Amino acid sequence: MTEHKLSDTLAAPGARTDVGPAVPAPGAVGALRPLGLDQARLRPDGLLGRWRRRNAEDTLPHCVDNLHSQGNIGNLAAAAGESDQEFAGMWFADSDVYKTLEAALWELATSPADAGLKDFVDTTTALLARAQQADGYLNSHFTIAAPEKRWLKPDWSHELYCAGHLIQAAVAAGRTGGSPELVAVARRFADLIVERFGPEGVEEVCGHPEIETALAELYRLTGHRPYLDLARRFLDLRGRGLLGPGRFGPVYYQDHVPVRDATEVAGHSVRQLYLLAGMVDVGVETGDRTLLDAAERLWEDVFHTKTYVTGAHGSRHRDEAYGDPYELPPDRAYGETCAAIASFQWNWRLLLATGRARYADEMERALYNAIAPALSADGRHFFYSNPLQLRTGHAGSGEEAAARRLPWYSCACCPPNIARLMASLPGYVATADAGGLQIHLYGDASLDTGVAGRPVRVEMRTDYPWQGRVELTVEDEGGRDEDPWTLALRVPAWCDTYAVSVGGETVDVPVQDGYVRLTRVWAPGTTLVLDLAMPVRRLSAHPRVDAVRGCVALARGPVVYCLEQADLPPGVVLEDVWLDPAAPVEAAHRDDPAGIPVVLTAGGRLAGSGDALYTALDESGPGRETGAPLALTAVPYFLWGNRSEGPMRVWIPLAATG
Amino acid sequence: MTEHKLSDTLAAPGARTDVGPAVPAPGAVGALRPLGLDQARLRPDGLLGRWRRRNAEDTLPHCVDNLHSQGNIGNLAAAAGESDQEFAGMWFADSDVYKTLEAALWELATSPADAGLKDFVDTTTALLARAQQADGYLNSHFTIAAPEKRWLKPDWSHELYCAGHLIQAAVAAGRTGGSPELVAVARRFADLIVERFGPEGVEEVCGHPEIETALAELYRLTGHRPYLDLARRFLDLRGRGLLGPGRFGPVYYQDHVPVRDATEVAGHSVRQLYLLAGMVDVGVETGDRTLLDAAERLWEDVFHTKTYVTGAHGSRHRDEAYGDPYELPPDRAYGETCAAIASFQWNWRLLLATGRARYADEMERALYNAIAPALSADGRHFFYSNPLQLRTGHAGSGEEAAARRLPWYSCACCPPNIARLMASLPGYVATADAGGLQIHLYGDASLDTGVAGRPVRVEMRTDYPWQGRVELTVEDEGGRDEDPWTLALRVPAWCDTYAVSVGGETVDVPVQDGYVRLTRVWAPGTTLVLDLAMPVRRLSAHPRVDAVRGCVALARGPVVYCLEQADLPPGVVLEDVWLDPAAPVEAAHRDDPAGIPVVLTAGGRLAGSGDALYTALDESGPGRETGAPLALTAVPYFLWGNRSEGPMRVWIPLAATG
């Protein structure tokens, strides 16, 4: 990690640079500074822009509707004494309200004209203020259903988890200027929490991490040091067994080892990842290198032994947990949507702290292959769990193993989590440091920001991720000969071959630490083209990943593909389809921008399969005999399940491996 | 299924033929009749005999000790008003007492001199009589901890499940003559159950099947028809949604479809298998072919798509359930010990009903590879779950994924279930029908039974399963020229080559329906040798079983083998070991009868494995490059984990598959 402080980086004159999630304070240790999501505009015809628009037009209104119909808003009304409603839903249902609020506030930052969203924010904030108790406590479940249990069950209650999401919504309110009232509500609760759990208070932590990153963010917003100190205290107290054994052991909520001593990710994956985000936040704000070292150590562990090829996290349904190293079953992948979002958020924090491209690579992988798949094409149906294989005959109709995206969940943590991620999407496109700009995510977008104290605009035109060509035009009207700066463009780790041209002239520029860096005086209107070659890749897993031995996953650019029953001839069972390694796999562009713009075509074989479950090898060979050929079509994994319900697989068996 | 009734078969004069589990009534439909476990003596130097002796000397006393130390007996004393103990353990803890009682009674049938066991039976029976309420109700949890909830939660309460195990213990008491008092206690409760749930009573079923087979057995013991009618009623009422959705949906407790309409096994595997046992019992006693057809249909399903190569059942930890077809992960195999025992019991019933060898084959597979592995060499430590792979770095310390056998469990269903299976082991060796005797399980044993109305003795000498040679001597002193009968010897499905000789002369006798059948007048002292060839088999799974693609399992005779860390050189990680398909795999006999009499030696390769979790195929090939050779030793899977705790795997990756 670089040693300089973020205050060394230079903001554009007058620009708000803190409009977005996880914005380090000026004195924090770190390498990169966010631009603020109001400085990046995603044009609506690019994929990222369409995702953001769908979020605003469909997902967010759908979330608001469900907060009403499922009783979340009614819970708060009851807590305010304005309704007789019995408590509805999960005991942490308030958190769904807070995440939706946060999403609405990020959305309003760049779409202030959305009166419906603004009304949701205002009325909900007012309701929260009325539901809040005199001492600042705010939790509808414990207020109306179990007042005598307030603060009594930290392993289970999610009180601090809910408070954390309230605080995150308030941080969005504060940074966007969207609701000073919400900031006030959150601070009243936060002050109560500091009083109870602070240095003079009880030694407790929350069974579900979230409060740590939230308090660090609230410190960033307010400059009030006790919030940061309490976040650090919660980290320091973890791993001492304060939460008790619980049903799944202390590892379930990462209470089995002090956070600085952990050597591998473990337990409930969302909890682990939110905790890691908090560790980075507290680490950069306090300069506590031990926290950052631990976070990077666990990054090494999880991305080398416990992550799906889609970027999904969590191998076990039983406790929504990481498995053993290399235990990555595609069919029973848990891959909770919230875990992918948490991974994205954690990697964003590590990217800001270190400037290392691997964190941006991971954000990209998770975005396209672990977050986007959770959402239906219509933006109103969701996966909670994101398996990499759905079998013929899948009988799991439970929400945790649904065969299709559902409109809502009894545990509805994921939909509003998607909403807040998509609403803040522009904020992750690029960053700045003292030397210039870094572009991490490619999309059809316009950046209005500042470099070296003067305004700079970068227009980015691309059909990414379907095409690897990215055209950029730099507008730096204040540029002078003596003011060179560096534009850094990420070359993803998946990309072996790339080309750069400036003003039509090819330039030979190496990849350094994951970026091509062009340092120059940018004459206004300088055009730049980055061309990332996107051949189809056939990915194989580490040989210790037993579950996908003899299989490949197809990918092109950042997008992982899959086979779906919808593309097979009638009567063909997906499990009997193997990939012919001798046949080429090629990308085919379709004139279907709203649907599936690029499919992959491949050659397959129909496996022979007898009746016997187990046979002696000498009788039938190794079970790899190849049968009739058939043409295969693979589609982007994030688009699966939009045409018909049916079997799907990312990992495809090879008909022969030579 | 044959149409004749069991009353057609001929018992030996004066012989008790009903001493054992699941003995059909004389009027039942069926093909074969049990001999009774008192007619088969397992000599203590054979493997089966040693298992039975270890059960009597170690497992059973260990169970009795734990019933005291864990509070199960204390619960009953509290229910009897003789103790202030708060309820201890699971709410169905009584069932552990009942299964231990059943085990003790089967054991006493052939070891009547065991005063300690006899005392346990007598004192526990007396305690049960005192704990029983005036109306016959007997359940310590609901008596002392939740009397107001009696009968109110059939989905959860396990009241009828516990009653079922009480009844099964009573059936053992009745058949062995071991405790008329226990029969009386059970009948009082059963009569209450008939009153409440019978034709005039409520329409309810139990969330955990068991009562169905138990009531059928009690009918067999007593001839009291209402017991059988109620068993049938419970089956008829299932699948109507009476249990409600529950946490995992109605499929969890097989309430999603009427039992006769089911086309595949589903849900909690132990519940499914106990239910299937009850379906067979009721089917043969009532002549209801639809129940038997359904049971055989589900047999086809489970043994062709959802059973591990060890005979274990259950692919999911979350709900202890069957997975989708071909979803058989070795590392996350649930393979509950009780499910293997239930499968054994179900197959025993199907064997008696139909005479088909496949059911005996399955009993053998489950016995050696799914039941025996649950028990430590010392007989005092147990697996609840029986995975086929334990990974390096396995962190699961929970009871459901223990890395080593534990002395007891908070949910202690498995240990006493093993005890009752092992105590009744002699009863499964052979059966009779009108035409003679059938030997299903080979072991060092002596059969004293009857054929055609006169006494017959068969001495069996063998080192099975370590050797395939079985020597039999038939003593039929009453044999006359006009009295031929048939000795049927099972030739397991795993055996391709066998030889039979009589009196030293090779005879050419075909396998018919899984048995060689020798029909003759058996001169006293006729010797017979069956020689089953036991080459090492390399088993591969159906190609749809993705989780073990490119792997083989090693087996010899009925025994499945595994690799254990204990046999690898220091520093070698088991996950990096592949089997060299070009190297021979050979059996090596050791002079170690109490330990590992036969190991397999094989050639292996150390896999190269980089750091990356996923790589593009063209860079590194398909991940099958072979490295340094090393010599491998495989040990019987049922003996794993007795030398040291450490990684293990049944399915071994092939270094190359040509």
Image (cartoon, coloured by chain):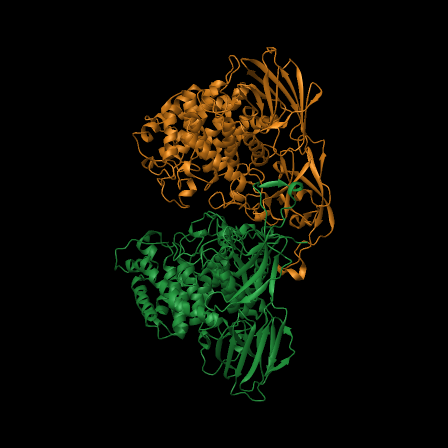
Chain colours: A orange, B green
- Percent x, y of residue B35: 49, 75
- Percent x, y of residue A337: 53, 37
The residue that appears at 34% across and 28% down in the rendered structure is A194
- Left or right of A374, for residue A141: left
Image-quadrant location for residue B422? bottom left
Say above or below: B437 vs A588: below
Say above or below: B91 vs B212: above
Say above or below: B88 vs B111: above
Q: Quadrant of the N terminus of chain B?
A: bottom right
Q: Residue furthest bottom?
A: B481
- Left or right of A355, for residue B81: left
Q: Quadrant of the C terminus of chain B?
A: bottom right
Residue A637 or B584: which is nearer the viewer?
B584
- Percent x, y of residue A301: 50, 39
Image-quadrant location for residue B433? bottom right
Residue A581 or A484: which is nearer the viewer?
A484
Residue B431 or B647: which is nearer the viewer?
B647
Can I make out residue A284 in this image? yes
Residue B275 or B108: which is nearer the viewer?
B108
- Percent x, y of residue B368: 51, 64
Number of marks present in the image shown: 0
The residue that appears at 63% across and 19% down in the rendered structure is A459
Say above or below: B351 vs A344: below
Image-quadrant location for residue B615? top right
The residue that appears at 46% across and 42% down in the rendered structure is A266
Can I make out residue A138 in this image? no
